């Protein structure tokens, strides 16, 4: 029998997109690829930060200026947790911080699923 001390908490993946239908699609893809993960959807950075549960954030998929996410408590927490920051972008002209991933629009289901297997 597992105790609460030996049970590993589910991975947390945060998706922050204004386009809620796209966010739901991403959540569906993530849940198919990682059914054990907890996927949190938010339409704004503020909403995401208010709803953050305890536990390690494995990945944040965001559609916002990289400097905004880097300076936020969500961005700092993902980095501190050793997670991935994925920036969804139609035209990413800014250089992303080292280790961050660009997810260009349009993207396919396989592009999203591959984020789970790529090293951080």
Image: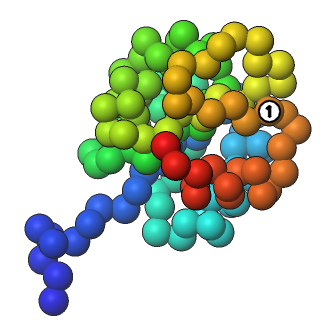
State the residue at coordinates (61%, 19%): 96
Residue 40 in the image: above or below residue 106 = below
Asked which quadrant contains residue 83, the reply is top left
Residue 42 in the image: above or below residue 56 = above
Asked which quadrant contains residue 75, the reply is top left
Counting from the top left corner in percent of width and height, residue 100 is at 56, 29
- In the image shown, does 16 or 94 lie closer to the viewer? 94
Q: How is the image coloured?
A: rainbow
Q: Mark 1 sits on what residue?
A: 104
State the residue at coordinates (15%, 89%): 1
Residue 97 in the image: above or below residue 106 = above
User: Dot 1: few (<14), some (14–19), or many (≥20) neighbours within 10 Å?
Assistant: some
State the residue at coordinates (36%, 40%): 82
Q: Is residue 102 left or right of residue 56?
A: right
Counting from the top left corner in percent of width and height, residue 91 is at 83, 19
Name the secondary structure under disc 1. Answer: strand
Q: Is residue 79 left or right of residue 111?
A: left
Query: Is residue 15 in view?
Result: yes
Query: Is residue 42 in view?
Result: no
Counting from the top left corner in percent of width and height, residue 103 is at 73, 36
């Amino acid at each position: 029998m597992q105790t609460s001390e030996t049970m590993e908490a589910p991975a947390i993946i945060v998706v922050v997109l204004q386009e809620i239908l796209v966010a739901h699609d991403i959540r569906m893809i993530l849940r198919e690829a990682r059914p054990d993960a907890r996927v949190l959807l938010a339409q704004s950075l503020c909403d995401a930060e208010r709803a953050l549960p305890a536990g390690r954030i494995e990945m944040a998929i965001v559609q916002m200026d990289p400097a905004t996410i880097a300076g936020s408590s969500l961005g700092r927490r993902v980095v501190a947790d050793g997670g991935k920051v994925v920036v969804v972008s139609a035209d990413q002209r800014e250089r992303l911080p080292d280790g961050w991933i660009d997810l260009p629009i349009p993207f396919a289901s396989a592009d999203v699923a591959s984020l789970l297997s790529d090293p951080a």
